[in-house]
Each structure stands twice: as structure tokens, then as C-alpha cells.
Image (cartoon, rainbow, N blue to C red):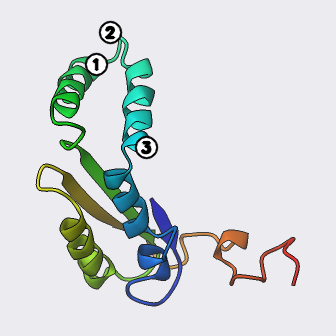
Amino acid sequence: MKTSKELRFPPSVVHHDKHGLVAQLTALHNDRSLKVCAVMYLGYRATTEQSWCGRYRTAAVRYFNSDAKVVSLFGVLVRDVAPAERDLAAAATNIANACCPDTRVALYGLYLPPDAIPAGPQHAARGKRKGSQS
């Protein structure tokens, strides 16, 4: 999940080299240890009291039987600007080209009213964040 107040399309948080949405989803696809952590995290919480326990078990069996290739990845971009298809179009193409056919990827854009995302140090220009040294 990435949030951006930036007035460019797509915002830099989508394609940023190491920490962008595309890089995160590609890393989740390529790094088996990250996937195992996610499967284990959910597995510890998939108790019989949970309504989703049966679905988790079915998905876990499919995952392990596929050599860790059958996965679903979800990316979310939250913005407080007018909706723009180009925010995620190139990202979708890049991720589709990087993933194997058994991987399902969904990208969602959540567009809030203008100025709905509060300003804060996470939205300040690099080097100008509160407490940073110049």
C-alpha cells in the first residue's frame, strides 16, 4: 500500500526504485522467504474460529503444491487527487511482465476527496523532514 499527495501521474511512490509499489510487489513475487513469512503469519491466525480458515487451508495447499507460484498479490494506491488510469496502468504492465502466469496480481486505486490525506513529515520533500539533518 502506498499513499501519495503528489500532483504527478503516476506519483513517484508507484515506480520508486527500491520502495515503490512495483518494487514491493515484484519482491513479494520473487522472494520465496517473503511469501513463506506471509503464509506463516496467516497460518498462525487461521484458527477454526476464523470464518476464513478453510479458505486459507485450501490456498496454502495450492501454494505449496505449486512450488510457491500460485499466489495472489494486491497493491493499493491511495490518493487525494482526481482519479487517473495512468496512475497504475504502467505498473500493471511492469508487474505482469515480471510475474509467472500462475501469479494473480490486482492493483487498486483509492481516490479520496482533495486534501483528505493530512500533510505530515512523510509527505515532505526528502531532506526537509522534521528532525532530519541537512
Please give left or right for residue 47 compared with residue 133 in the image. left
| Residue designated by label 2 | 48
Q: Quadrant of residue 84?
A: bottom left
- Residue ID at (37%, 41%): 35
Quadrant for the C terminus in the image: bottom right
Please give left or right for residue 20 compared with residue 92 in the image. right
Asked if one can make out residue 111 in the rendered structure from this viewpoint, the answer is: no
> Pointer 3: residues within 10 angstroms few (<14), some, or many (20+)?
few
Disc 1 residue type? Cys
Q: Secondary structure at mark 2?
A: loop
| Residue designated by label 3 | 34
Marker count (numbered) = 3
- Per the rendering, the mark at residue 53 is 1
Residue lying farthest top?
Answer: 48
Tell me the CA gap for discs 1 and 2.
Answer: 6 Å
Q: Is residue 57 above or below residue 115?
A: above
